[in-house]
Image (cartoon, grey):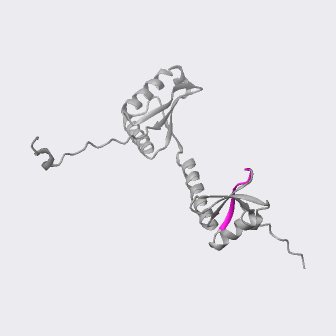
Amino acid sequence: MRPQLKQNRPEEAFRINHRIRVPEVRVIDEDGEQLGIMSTYDAIRKAEEKGLELVEVSPKAQPPVCKIMDYGKFKYERAKQEKVKRQNATQISMKEVKFRPKTDDHDLDFKIRNIKKFLEEGDKIRVVVSFRGREIVHPEFGFQLLESILKDLGDGVDVEQKPTHEGRAVSMLLAPVAKLKVKKPETVRPEEEARPLP
């Protein structure tokens, strides 16, 4: 029989309880109250009396700072926060919409509707006008088309990169405009409006 290899357990992000190897620590209780410096043994015992763990939250401090807490709940909340961060980091995607200098009106309208849809979903869009053959001798047609597209999009767009000519294409980078919260005007109740002046 082959000897079974022991699987290494992943290390905890924080040292807890008897994994804390220093003689004394600065302790914060579960309500955020400073308990001061005490021996690590006493701090662990205090945490265990409450059915909680002693967690080293600032190991480089002198002495290290530890907090009494429910470590399982703490890890769960951290995992949720990390998940939200990852979602926010990947939420904004880049789309690309391509045009030709002589795109017909129907195709133009269809693609502009798609751009508006992408902007509403929070995506960035690279709008590209590609040239073929001798079309490249008139790059101004590409600039004119991009300007026309911008006019059709109206105010709901932010131009992150102005139209530029590179190789056989003219392109620009668009992003959605951040929506501002409009404060509603205060309404006056009818009884207040009719109240006579003193």
Q: Residue at x 64, y 70 (%)?
A: 52
**Residue 105 picture location, percent across and down:** 37, 34
Residue 177, relative to residue 27: is it above or below?
A: above
Between 107 and 190, the one nearer to me in the picture? 190
**Residue 79 picture location, percent across and down:** 60, 60
Looking at the image, residue 176 sits to the left or right of residue 27; the answer is: left
**For the magenta stretch, what is the residue range?**
53-61
Q: Residue at x 45, y 47 (%)?
A: 121
**Residue 23 picture location, percent across and down:** 79, 61
**Residue 26 picture location, percent across and down:** 69, 57
**Is 56 contained in the magenta span?**
yes
Which quadrant, please, contains the N terminus? bottom right
Which quadrant, please, contains the C terminus? top left
**Is 11 contained in the magenta span?**
no
- The secondary structure making up most of the magenta span is strand
Residue 137, relative to residue 36: is it above or below?
A: above
Q: Residue at x 70, y 70 (%)?
A: 45
Looking at the image, residue 156 sits to the left or right of residue 11; the answer is: left
